[in-house]
Structure formats: C-alpha cells, structure tokens
Image (cartoon, helix red, strand yellow):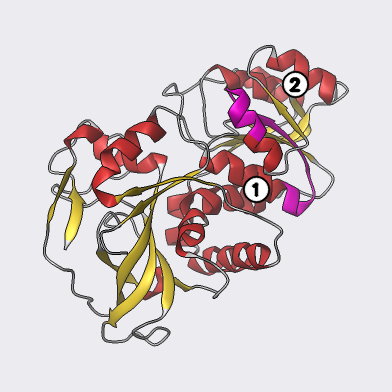
C-alpha cells in the first residue's frame, strides 16, 4: 500500500510518500480500507518531535481515517467486512489502509460521508470534550472561542451553539470571521483591540468560558475577560508561544484555568469518549451541527496540507484522499 512515512523527526517537508507493507489486523483489531483521512495540527507537531508522544521512527503519522472494513482480527464482535466506519488511532492513518483497536472504531450512519466522519473525530472530539466535560458549558452562558477559523475553533463555535451558549468567536482574517458566523457564532471579532471589544460586548461582565487553542498574547486577554466563576480552557498553542499567567488574575476574577488533553481523555475514559461520539453523530444527523471541509487533497500531498495547517492557512478541516478512493 501507499503511505506517508516519517523517517526522522524534523520539518514536515521531510515526509515521504512510499510503498509500505499492508497491515494485518491482530487480536481485537479492525483493518480499514481508507476513503478519507483527516489532517490535524497535532500531526505536524508529532512529525517535528514537538508533541506529547514520540513514536519510534520510522512511523506513519495521522490520527483519523474513515472507510470500509476489509477484515477483522480474532475477538472482534462489533464489525464485519464491508461495514462503513471511522477510526481514531495514535498514529498510522496517513495510509491507504490502517488497523485500529475495535474500541477506537465507530460505525457510521448512512447519512454521514467519510470526510464529515473524519472531521468529527479529533477536532470536534477535542472541542466537545473541552466544553462538555472540562468546562461544563451551560445553555445561556457566554463562550469565547479564540482561533475561531481553525477546524477545532469552528467545532467549538458549532458545539457551543448546540449546547445553547452565546458564542463570541475571534479570528485573524475577515474570511475566517465569516466562517465563524456561518458556523453559528453570534459575534466574530478580530484580535486587534480585543480586550476593549470583549468588555463592551459583555457589558463589562466578562465571559463564562474561554476556549483557547492558540496561546500567545490572546491568552492574557482571555484571562482578563473572565467572568466570576469563569473557566479558561488551555487547549493548545497554535501561535507557537506558550503563555504565562499572572496568578493574581485567577484570584481577582475567581476564575479557573483548566487543561484539555484530549488524547489522555480518550485513553483513560473510553466509555465517556464513546458517549461523546454518539452525541456528536446524533447532532450531525439532526442538523444541529455542520462540519466545514476546507479542502481535499491526494494522500501524496500530505506534507503540503500539513504545512498549510501549521501556517494557520486552513479554514476548517483538511482531508486527504488515498489513490483509488
């Protein structure tokens, strides 16, 4: 099969598109013939050796893929050949085929296409876990979403609206702010003069929940914009800058700073993770949420796709398509 292989940690331009052996499903594993593969910001960090985990090289990056079951290993009871599925893995998805533990494979409704299924995995899964379990966002609260134009930010916007929050999105370009509004944001703001804008738009009260996958200077603005009992979610650092927080802000605001490590959540709470996916799939089927696919590219162009995401050029989800899919 063809796959994207990382032979050594470094720039994503070093990834190679090459022939690799077909995987064979082991005990309680499912072999999937991929039709769509999701591209995520953490994939780029993983390839550069900057992510929380570091697989032994060479390895195939990629965390999510959707397609049809080609075979199942011993002990698999929920799937059979020909089933339409989506899978989450730690790495290995940038390939024409992949194996995944049965517990990380989910059946797809006939109404959901493979690209949407990929979009609902990492980016939407992260945003959903952040807002549901970590922030416990409630209907009627005000949600601030930084990095609103990225796939995770747009997911947070849409999920916030599905829960019933008032959503204020922040994005760096006019096109990204337009995408936020299309995804349901009540308001879309630029980063410039953000502190004053948030004070004005909340009547000085502040926001109940802030979702920050960006880091950098905007983090302090969010910390200063928290309402009493507000929850500031640390999701990631797409800006490349890990910010520092003045602890007196937390004291004065009586707010909380909450970490969101979705990968650890998936491994430690698989039942809750599965329930989250069921809710996302149900919302999708009912039209309560809608993914945004920014572009689809051949699998061979994975490095270019990743670089565009690292440069924060994508608006929504990027999908890779294997040959013949």
Category of crowding for the residue at label 1, using alpha-carbon neighbours closer than 10 angstroms: few (below 14), some (14–19), many (at least 20)? many
Instruction: In the displayed orientation, state which residue is furthest to the front.
Output: 324
Q: Mark 1 and mark 2 in contact? Answer it, CB < 8 Å.
A: no
Give the camera-side residue of 155 and 246. 155
Distance of label 1 from label 2 (alpha carbons)? 23 Å
Residue 166 image offset from top left, x and y in percent = 80, 40
Q: What residue sits right under mark 2 in the picture?
A: 252
Tell me the quarter of the picture where residue 322 sits. bottom left
Residue at point 26%, 82% (across, down)? 73
Residue at point 67%, 63% (across, down)? 283
**Which mark is on residue 65?**
none
Category of crowding for the residue at label 2, using alpha-carbon neighbours closer than 10 angstroms: few (below 14), some (14–19), many (at least 20)? few
Q: Is residue 37 left or right of residue 179?
A: left
Residue at point 69%, 17% (across, down)? 194
Residue at point 60%, 42% (across, down)? 154
Q: What residue sits right under mark 1 in the picture?
A: 131
Q: Quadrant of the N terminus?
A: bottom left
Q: From what the image shows, is residue 12 above or below residue 281?
A: above
Q: From what the image shows, is residue 191 above or below residue 298?
A: above
Residue 230 image offset from top left, x and y in percent = 74, 35
Give the camera-side residue of 148 and 316. 316
Q: Is residue 43 left or right of residue 219?
A: left
> Does dot 2 land on a helix, a strand or a loop?
helix
Instruction: In the displayed orientation, state which residue is furthest to the right.
Output: 203
- Residue 51 visible in the picture: no
Tag in front: 1 or 2: 1
Whether residue 221 is in magenta: the answer is no
Segment tinted magenta in the rendering: 161-178
> Does dot 1 land on a helix, a strand or a loop?
helix
């Amino acid at each position: 099969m063809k796959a994207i292989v990382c032979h050594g940690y470094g720039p994503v331009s070093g990834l190679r598109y090459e022939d690799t052996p077909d995987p064979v499903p082991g005990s309680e594993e499912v072999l999937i013939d991929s039709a769509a593969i999701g591209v995520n910001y953490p994939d780029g960090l993983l390839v550069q050796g900057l992510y929380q985990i570091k697989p032994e090289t060479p390895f195939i990056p990629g965390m999510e893929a959707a397609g049809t079951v080609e075979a199942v290993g011993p002990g698999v009871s929920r799937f059979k050949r020909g089933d339409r599925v989506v899978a989450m893995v730690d790495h290995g998805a940038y390939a024409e085929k992949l194996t995944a533990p049965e517990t990380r494979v989910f059946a797809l409704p006939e109404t959901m296409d493979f690209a949407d299924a990929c979009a609902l995995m990492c980016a939407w899964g992260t945003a959903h876990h952040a807002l549901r379990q970590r922030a416990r966002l409630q209907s009627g609260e005000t949600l601030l979403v930084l990095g609103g134009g990225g796939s995770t930010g747009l997911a947070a916007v849409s999920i916030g609206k599905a829960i019933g929050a008032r959503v204020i999105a922040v994005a760096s370009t006019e096109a990204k702010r337009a995408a936020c509004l299309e995804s349901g944001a009540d308001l879309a703001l630029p980063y410039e003069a953000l502190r004053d804008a948030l004070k004005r738009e909340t009547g000085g009260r502040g926001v109940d929940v802030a979702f920050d996958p960006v880091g950098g200077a905007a983090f302090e603005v969010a910390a200063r914009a928290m309402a009493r009992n507000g929850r500031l979610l640390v999701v990631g650092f797409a800006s490349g800058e890990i910010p520092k927080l003045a602890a007196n802000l937390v004291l004065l605001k009586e707010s909380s700073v909450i970490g969101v490590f979705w990968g650890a959540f998936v491994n430690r709470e698989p039942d809750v993770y599965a329930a989250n996916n069921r809710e996302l799939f149900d919302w999708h089927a009912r039209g309560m949420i809608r993914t945004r696919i920014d572009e689809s590219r051949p699998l061979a162009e994975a490095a270019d796709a990743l670089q565009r995401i690292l440069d924060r050029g994508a608006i929504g989800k990027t999908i890779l398509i294997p040959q013949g899919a």
